Image: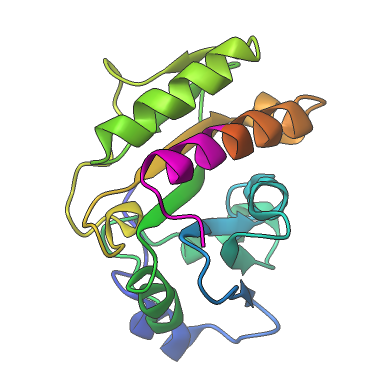
Amino acid sequence: MDDKYTCFAALAARETAGRDYRIRIIERRGAPVLVVAPHGGTIEVGTSELAGLVAGAEHSLFVFEGLKPRGPSRDLHITSHRFDHPQCLSLASRCPITLALHGCRGESHLYLGGLDRRLKSVLEKHLGAAGLPVSAEGHRYLGRHPLNICNRGTRGRGAQIEITHDLRTGSRLHLIAGAVRSGLHEYVAQLNLLR
């Protein structure tokens, strides 16, 4: 299914902030990680909540949330390599690690994508150790486009996690967030980005 809008400016010209969508931003100066939910709220249910849990009190956060009912909210979906909200791009341009969280179809699985192979490997290790079904290769959610929002950080590579509906809305949300946070902590330490 094609997106109704190909960029944020086109969406903002036709949709009303505060009625159709909202944006939540928490910038933590000096934080090396930006957690993004570009299709939050009613667009991909559960991704806003998961992004907030993963960001916690130390990572920066950008969430674009649909406020329309679930069907019409699909109109607010801008594919990841076209997601160009200026404040999100500005935040990403100051962070060495960008992690995007998405919803996908299917049952009980997490799919890792993005150009940062090392980060994907660390996340796969932590999610797998938590007993979660995860794949880093051999799926359709590769996130390798250089303009994908997850790859727009200072290092030109990041990661995304595509999460099935049952996992992003069920009882394992905190388990997923904890595993992702542990993986991010390990990766930040590996890159010596702690300040």
Drawn side of residue 187 relative to residue 146, left or right = right
> Which residue is more in the foreground, 112 or 116?
116
Tell me which residue sits at (55%, 21%) in the image: 126
Instruction: Report the coloring of the rendering.
Output: rainbow
Region in magenta: 183-195
Residue 82 position, x and y percent, is 28, 64
* Left or right of 74 in this view: 22: right
Viewer can see residue 59: yes
Can residue 141 be seen in this snapshot? no
What residue lies at 68% left-to-right and 45% top-to-bottom?
50
- Seen from the viewer's position, the closer of residues 195 and 167 is 195
| Residue 1, x across and y down, in percent | 35, 46
**Residue 184 lies in the magenta-colored region:** yes
Spot occupied by residue 163 in the image (x, y as percentages of width and height): 54, 31
Residue visible at 38% across and 68% down? 92
Report the number of discs: 0
Q: Main secondary structure of the magenta part?
A: helix
Query: Horizontal and vertical percent for residue 11?
Result: 42, 79
Queried whether the magenta region covers residue 18, the answer comes back as no
Q: Residue furthest right?
A: 171
- Closer to us: 111 or 186: 186
Q: Nearer the viewer, residue 72 or 50?
A: 50
Which residue occupies the extreme left position in the image? 146
Residue 174 drawn above or below residue 76: above
Residue at the image position 57 percent from the left and 66 percent from the top: 60
